[in-house]
Image (cartoon, rainbow, N blue to C red):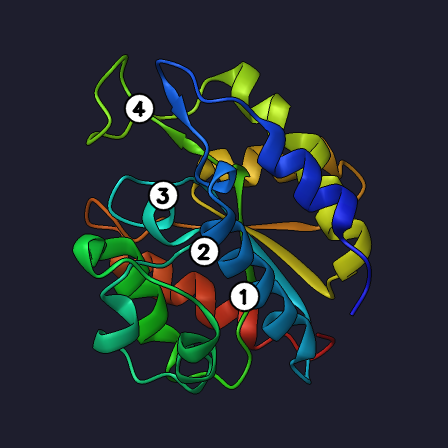
Amino acid sequence: MPNLDSFYTKLSKRKNTLTVFNPYRDETKLENLKRYIELAFEQSGPRILLVGEAYGFKGGRLTGIPFSSGKLFDEVDHPFLLQLKPKIELNPDTLTAENTASIVWRYLCSQETVPLFWNSFPYHPHPSRIQKKNRAPLKAEIEEGLELLQMLMNVYQPDAIAGLGRKGTDCLQKAFPDQDIRYIRHPSYGGKSDFITGMNQLFNIDSV
């Protein structure tokens, strides 16, 4: 497992503000992320990096794991999730469901390879003082996340890179202008069918 100590340190140092919550100031959630990334690195097969927008208040904010929720581990019997569950700690009082995570992982049940998930802004952006609501990350926040994204990619060395939704894709294109970045429709707001099409195309690349 490559050394990601500087990555985790930088990630955890980001201060909370009136509009941004950093789950990684909580050591438990930081350890959850470490266990997730370690397991993702241990997989055989092609390495795929899939980058979304930011954490939501029902999902990664509570677990520390991108594209997840507390209830996901009981909803979806994916081998990766079954391996990960005993390695992490989840607060039983915050086991909520998150629709995007459920859609993504139910799709992955048909695939042998699990992407390494990340977000262009790896924190929870929310309206001022309203913790239980989401907002889109600002341009400056996306730019803030670029260094962390680059650090992770330099260690992971993916065979294929894709953005889930426009913000994730835009962040990747800015961070890696010379790379082939694939756009995948976000499954929310009627995009589930296009999401599945995009993921099928991503997983059926012969060279990956």
Q: Secondary structure at mark 1?
A: helix
Q: Amino acid at mark 1?
A: Tyr
* Position of residue 127 in the picture relative to residue 54 (left or right): left
Residue found at x 62% / y 22%: 143
Q: Secondary structure at mark 3?
A: helix
Task: Decide which of tag 2 and tag 4 comes sooner along the chain.
Answer: 2
Asked whether the beta carbons under mark 1 and mark 2 sit within 8 Å of each other, the answer is: yes
Quadrant hosting residue 150: top right
Please give the residue where the numbered disc 3 appears in the rendered image: 61
Asked whether the beta carbons under mark 3 and mark 4 sit within 8 Å of each other, the answer is: no
Q: From mark 1 to mark 3, how far is it between C-alphas?
A: 15 Å
Please state the horizontal and vertical placement of residue 169, each as a whole percent of the image: 55, 40
10 Å crowding of disc 1: few (<14), some (14-19), many (20+): many
Residue found at x 45% / y 66%: 199
State the residue in front, 24 or 68.
24
In which quadrant will I find the C terminus?
bottom right
Please give the residue where the numbered disc 4 appears in the rendered image: 126
Inspect this view and state whether residue 190 appears.
yes
Q: Which mark is residue 36?
A: 1
Task: Decide which of tag 3 and tag 4 comes sooner along the chain.
Answer: 3
Task: Decide which of tag 1 and tag 3 comes sooner along the chain.
Answer: 1
